[in-house]
Image: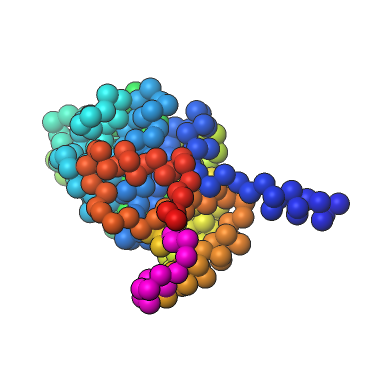
């Protein structure tokens, strides 16, 4: 019986495309990530272009401080979503979670932020939290970004993420925030009156009830985001790598960490492959291809239950809407090496 199952598995391998992502209409959040320099931005832009063909509206958002979306599409993007030139239903934006936190603190006295109006008390509290809980500054910036995104009406949001380490920290923020805000609320319940009295004595304009009311609202938002990120019907992560030892090692580490965060991943894109049908007179090309083949075999063994998309090393830069459109076709139609 087991022999038959093996035969079925090898004779019907998973499709080597990202068509499964396009077909899963329930997906709301799609993350694209991997080691630096493996082609994450090209892949995320190409995937967003393909999604725009079958979804009502798509938002492509960069959380990488390097912000390469503007370079990829040859169009300037910022922290407000704008339509990508040549597309009716594809928008893009580049955000910095830490920058969002700074804006929130600076605007606390003049308008609603993550915790509403809070003035100097909010800035002081943010400073205290940063020292007390490592990573809380980026996490609260993340919360501000997610609050903005939840108010936007897009059928699908694609994240072009920072290199692996930053991305994994980014994905851990919902759980970190849930714990932090719950702890803060517990303290406020026990010492709320004292906080107001001390604040008044020090001349701080604090409205403790309003502040912690906003915290509860934020906690509920983050709790919902956390639930959605862990739902494979709503969220998936596309791993991008190249066929080299360090990239493969980091991809495996990322897959294991994603599993620990309960985030679905079942697609691997292998970029920059020398896909030639036969050897040629270029000694370096042949040596390079042999190394790639070695690690590609390992990728296929490790991720036999994944969709593995193999993309070639192209002879030109993939920049501008037309080139991205053309490159994106290889995500849904397996590349065939020329004879």
The colouring scheme, among rainbow, by chain, secondary structure or one colour, is: rainbow
- Quarter of the C terminus within the rendering: bottom left
Q: Is residue 209 rendered to the left or right of residue 7?
A: left
Give residue 223's position: percent from left, percent from top: 46, 36
Give residue 256's position: percent from left, percent from top: 54, 58
Res. 232 in view: yes
Pick the residue in front: 261 or 132: 261
- Looking at the rendered structure, the number of numbered marks drawn on it comes to 0
Above or below: residue 80 compared with residue 296: above
**Main secondary-structure element of the magenta-colored stretch:** loop
Pick the residue in front: 89 or 107: 89
Pick the residue in front: 173 or 122: 173
Pick the residue in front: 30 or 291: 291
Above or below: residue 255 compared with residue 108: below
In the picture as drawn, the residue positioned furthest to the right comes out as: 1
Give residue 6's position: percent from left, percent from top: 75, 54
Q: Quadrant of residue 303?
A: bottom right
Q: Residue at x 33, y 41 (%)?
A: 326
Residue 131 shown in magenta: no
Q: Quadrant of residue 55?
A: top left
Q: Residue at x 48, y 46 (%)?
A: 334
Above or below: residue 83 compared with residue 140: above
Q: Residue at x 69, y 50 (%)?
A: 11
Q: Residue at x 81, y 51 (%)?
A: 4
Res. 159 in view: no
Residue 277 shown in magenta: yes
The stretch of residues the image draws in magenta is 275-286
Give residue 263's position: percent from left, percent from top: 52, 46
């Amino acid at each position: 019986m087991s022999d038959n199952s093996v035969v079925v598995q090898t004779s019907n391998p998973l499709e080597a495309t990202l068509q499964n992502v396009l077909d899963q209409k329930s997906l709301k959040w799609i993350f694209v990530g991997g080691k630096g320099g493996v082609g994450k931005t090209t892949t995320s832009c190409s995937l967003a272009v393909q999604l725009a063909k079958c979804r009502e509206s798509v938002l492509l958002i960069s959380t990488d401080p390097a912000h390469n979306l503007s370079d990829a599409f040859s169009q300037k993007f910022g922290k407000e979503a704008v339509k990508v030139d040549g597309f009716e239903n594809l928008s893009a934006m580049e955000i910095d979670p830490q920058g969002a936190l700074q804006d929130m603190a600076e605007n606390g006295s003049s308008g609603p932020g993550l915790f509403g109006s809070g003035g100097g008390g909010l800035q002081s509290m943010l400073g205290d939290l940063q020292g007390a809980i490592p990573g809380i500054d980026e996490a609260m910036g993340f919360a501000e970004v997610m609050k903005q995104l939840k108010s936007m009406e897009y059928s699908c949001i694609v994240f072009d993420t920072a290199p692996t380490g930053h991305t994994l920290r980014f994905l851990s923020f919902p759980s970190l925030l849930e714990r932090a805000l719950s702890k803060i609320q517990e303290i406020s319940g026990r010492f709320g009156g004292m906080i107001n009295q001390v604040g008044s004595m020090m001349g701080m304009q604090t409205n403790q009830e309003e502040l912690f009311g906003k915290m509860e609202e934020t906690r509920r938002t983050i709790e919902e985001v956390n639930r959605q990120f862990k739902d494979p019907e709503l969220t998936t992560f596309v791993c991008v790598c190249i066929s080299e030892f360090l990239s493969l090692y980091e991809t495996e580490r990322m897959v294991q960490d994603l599993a620990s965060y309960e985030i679905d991943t079942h697609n691997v894109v292998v970029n920059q492959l020398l896909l030639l049908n036969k050897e040629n007179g270029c000694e370096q090309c042949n040596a390079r291809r042999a190394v790639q083949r070695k690690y590609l075999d390992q990728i296929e063994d490790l991720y036999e239950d994944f969709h593995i998309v193999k993309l070639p090393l192209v002879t030109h830069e993939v920049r501008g809407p037309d080139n991205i459109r053309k490159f994106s076709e290889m995500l849904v139609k397996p590349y065939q090496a020329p004879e």
